Amino acid sequence: MLEVSGLTKVFGGLTAVKDLTFTLQRGEILSIIGPNGAGKSTCFKLISSFMVPTSGTVRFNGQDITGIGPHAVARKGIVRTFQENTAFQDMTVREAVLLGYQKDCKASLAGMILRSPQARRDDREAGAHADRVLDLLGMSSHAGTLAAGLPHGLLRNLGIAVALAARPQLILLDEPFAGLNSDETKRGVELIRKIRDEGITPILVEHDMAAVMSVSERIVVVNFGSKIAEGTPAEIQRNDKVIEAYLGSEDEEIGL
Amino acid sequence: MTQVLLNALVVGTTYALIALGITIIFSIMKVVNFAHGQLYMIGGFVVYYFNVVFGLPFWFGLLMSFVIVGALGIAMELFLFRPVMLRVKREEVTMLLAMGTAVFLESLALIVFGEKQRGVPPIATGIVELFGARLPTGRVVVIVVAALLIVALMLFIGYTKTGRALRAMAQDRDATALQGVNLKWLSAMGFGLGTGLAGLAGGLLVAIFAVHTGAGTAVSIKAFLMIMIGGAGVLSGAILGGFVLGVLESVGYALLPGSMTFLIIFLIVIGFLIVRPHGIMGKPWG
Amino acid sequence: MKSSGIKVTLLVRALALATTAGTFALISLAQANETLKIGALGVMSGPFAGWGGVMCQTSKTRAAMWNDDGGVAIGDKTYNIEVVCVDDKGDPKGAQTGAEKLVSEGIKYIQGPNTDSTAESAKAVMEANGTINMPYAFSKSLYKAPASQSILGMVASYQVGPVIYKWLMDNKGIKKIAFVCENNADPLNQRNEGTAAAKTLGLEVVSDQETYESGTTDFFPVLTKVIGTSPDHIVLSGVNPSDVGPLIKAARELGFTGTMSTETGQDPRAIFEVAGEAANGFIVAGGASTEAIRSDFMVKFIERYTKDWGEWNDVAGLYVYGPEIIVQTLQSTPKALDDTEAFKAALDSFVGKNPFLKEGGELKYVGRQDYGQSRQVSVPIVVQAVKDGAYEPLFVGKLPD
Amino acid sequence: MNTQDTIPMSGFAMPQSAASPLKPLGLGLLVAIAYFIGVPLLFGGNGYVLNVTTTMAVVSFISFGVWLTFAIGRINLAQAGFALIGSYVTAILVSRFGVSFWLCLPLSGLVAAIIGGLIGWPVLRLKGVYFAMITLCITEACRLTALSFPAVTRGAQGIVDLPLPGELSLFGLTLIPAFEKGARLPFFYLAGSLLMLGLWFMWLLDTSRVGAVFRSLRQNEDLAVSLGINIAKYRVVAFMVSCFYAGVGGAFFAALQQNVYPTSFQVIDSVYFMVYCFVGGLEFVIGPLVGALVMMVSFELLHELQRYQTVIFSGLMILCILLMPNGILSVLKARAARAKEASDA
């Protein structure tokens, strides 16, 4: 489904991502892990076209999507979420989720403004879809709450909900568990499985090792921008290179 | 041509001095001080009153222009900008507040100072001839003083404790607060320094130019041009921007028909910002 | 105790009586004098506040003098003059609103506005309501038919320019002339008119494309190029009072030794304060308050103005002609109080007295040559030179009929 | 109409419309009645009041554009420049080519919008203070362009003595009679119609999906683009609509004043358009109208202060920002919300 080959990004003299290659099958849960500053987030930005790679290609469903621009990538079916609590602060949960549907609206600009029949159909579909997404994430009761008033954990869910509303085939989750307590993390893991069961393939960039190990089916480990290991969670936990890479940082992170 | 380059040097130095104050306020408060030109104008009148009306020495008046306009700035920070910034939903409101202050100061100045243009007796007489170009001694004195002031400010910002704290605040307010620096005092202080510099520029330049109550807006617009060229919120950028504008203006007037000069300068600035959105030395903001 | 109580009562009664009498006196005074309102519409805030602000203050001062003398007799009644000032902010939208405001207050005679764009915008209101106004703007379409409501209150630059240039050719032998002005509508127009006039006179125009932006502080860059063309004379067309001093100073510092002039009224002390001795010899047209030619009445006016507003501004010597000629015309044609058509009909024949000049002279409406109808006040063309912060007159000319 | 049709509308309706005691339609109707019937009935013969109202209506019309660029998170100081463009388009077409004013009015908006689109495409990448400054440069550049090309614009001389709008007829049927000299009501009604149309369209836009997209751009462009929204396109659309409003407003003023000069619209006008939006409240479609109304009426009321007029006016403006930094309407809204809470409890 997704083929990343030879992806390289150089900032000034610094190589953030170096010759990264991996592929992803539809329906599998893949995580990219690595110590701080290893280039994981840059990798996400390159896939979602928020940055243009120095070299290398990203192919999606056989099509070359390298550097075609973030909104074009989203239209192909890849939607990312953001680190921290990125949201439309002054919108209610439902408004934000409705907005996620925007790229699938068929009405013209004038039609949207003047409420053409097509725009009304779009809105009805968007509404139905939004309700489904909110239901899936268990956020229906918060539909009318302003994003600025949501607690931390729900804000993270809102980010995922908005991304799901855009009906992606592939969702890039940037640190979905950061800052969550163990209960919330547990629910998050379940949620990711649920998403996959809906037919949406997730990729994670994550620090929380315990969660990664429990949710992932395959893991790619990067350090200093290069891939140092790839395999199932069990394989990764045994990999010497990975253990060595993590020794410099906090041991508990790897969850051994 | 020597005269043109010399003109550029004088104009550039004075512009750099004008740009410094506005950029300090922008870097620490993220406020675009639309009242900068009006404060410059008040600085000029302060010197005029001390020097001409009260008959005190010019240099004393200059000192007072820094003190009085600086104090005005501290008052503006304490009583206007701070309370508003605490409560607004949109940062842009501070810009509006600055605009309101500009109109207020200008119309108040018109009532207090009258409509006439004012000047002070020359601080130095005579003319220096340089390679066939003419440079009045008064201008030499002014640009030397302006250059000294710029250097002094750079040293202050770079090497004193307060200066370093200001720089730290410009980069990261919260982190600075964590280091036990009194942010309230510091931001009022920074604001006062910025407006004081505006007053100082106005006070110094009244020695070779003149001042009238309506001079502010045009000075502000030019100051904006400079900080945009140089990069908002960067001191060295402001100085560079001042010189670039000085050169563009002097060379433009020499080579182009007058009415085209500023049209072309504006178009260059627009084009330049499209290519380099954060000026020559600026960092992204927004 | 008792006697003092009676005394107090008496005192109170006396006071009450006095107050009542006073009130009656006031009422009877008010009954004797009706109020005639005159408008002043101009830019009184912002960078060009000097223009309209002085105009308003001038008219108010003149009105106060009339009122102190017991009012103005028009027809069989005596009127107190009330001046209503409106700030148009130099904005055409504001000029229209301001004109409508004055009209709505029943005002038929208005001084101002001060710029082409504001005067043109106020024109629509004046024409529609039959209100007379007296702009200090030179756009000819204001005064030429079919327009009929506006009367130019001063000498136009294109009228005085040739007079000055001719005098300079004859007396100073100038041959090459240069023009420099602000890059703004009014000054540019005046420059173009001036250039054309100079060419007609046979002068060589060596520089007429150089302009500076409003709010320029340093005039070295622009003047370097002008002086590089080595003119004998530099004209500062339509110059804003705030720029005159710095311009003269910069020109002298750049080594210019020829003569300089402007066609708009200026204050000599302000120029002298900024430019110092370099200002001496600078030629200005306008004003009628020059010491050598002013009447005792003008002196009184200057005193009053200084008392009311703190400091004399020579430009007031020009604006004062506005209310003066309006009132004198009304006195000669009382019917015009309500009927501006009668006012317009009187324009061709009206002849009044000029109280501001020592030699007196006529005050009338001219402009038939330039506009095809009498739509200009015959302000004397006083050409004068700055001398140590005052003016010395060079010559006094007359506008053509 | 079934109930389902109304659901999407409420989905994107501005939050305040639900909280406000007046529904938008009722509010619009109220404004319209006050304008079209109330003002002429009370002040029909007073040219001054009519002129203030007319000017206020079109100035707030132009300010709607600024409001829209605020909605996408940009501080727009170019509005006066585009109004000047609109004025010149109408003035040139009417005076040189005798084109009907009624054609010029939308055409001026269109030309301004097209120029705005061309300039906006690259310029809108800038944010914050840089965008504000660059748009300030655009306003100045427009004035200087008008001065520098006398062959087209008559430069400093301005274009004067423009004829009043003529008759508008369709197939021999007179829709709008020719404007008569000195008649103020035609301009008054035209201004009111523009205001109502402008307000209606802004409201439609703001409550539509497009309005939600615009608001999302202000709050987080990265998040919006990650959802597949072509932010560059929407930014330019918002800016073009804004310029259209400016162009039409400029054309109106050219006709009302019967002249245009390079100084007809200047930086200070841009500033005031922005001020009106702020004073009214940036969250509210009707904000620019409220702001313009309050500001312009208070300026006129302060006239009695004579030479203290401007200083008191600007002092009040500062006070207004100090006391109501989020605009007049936000205070009213908060009060309405409190009242509702009290009555609920």
Image (cartoon, helix red, strand yellow):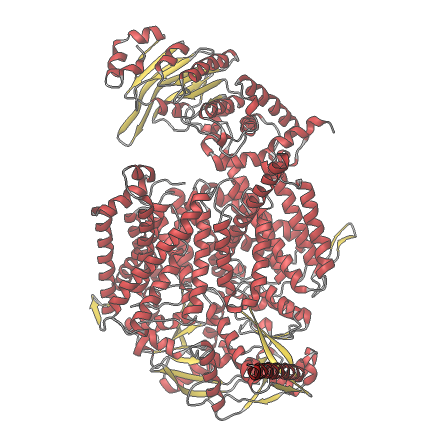
| Residue C223 found in image quarter | bottom left
Q: Who's the residue at 46% across and 89% down the image? A: C294
User: Where does residue A55 sit, x and y in percent of width and height?
Assistant: 34, 24
Residue C177 higher or lower than C331, as above or below: above
Left or right of residue C76, residue B129 in this image: left
Residue D163 higher or lower than C198, as above or below: above
Q: Is residue C155 visible?
A: no
| Residue A66 found in image quarter | top left
Of all residues, the one furthest to the bottom in this rendering is: C359
Residue D269 higher or lower than B28, as above or below: below
Q: Quadrant of the N terminus of chain A?
A: top left
Residue D145 higher or lower than B232, as above or below: below
User: Where does residue D287 sit, x and y in percent of width and height?
Assistant: 58, 47
Of all residues, the one furthest to the front in this rendering is: C1
Q: Quadrant of the C terminus of chain A?
A: top left
Left or right of residue B225, residue D201 in this image: right
Total label count? Answer: 0
User: Where does residue B10 sit, x and y in percent of width and height?
Assistant: 27, 61
Q: Is residue B157 visible?
A: yes
Front position in the image: D83 or D117: D83
Q: Who's the residue at 37% across and 19% down the image? A: A206
Q: Who's the residue at 59% across and 66% down the image? A: C98
| Residue B178 found in image quarter | top left
User: Where does residue D131 sit, x and y in percent of width and height?
Assistant: 44, 45
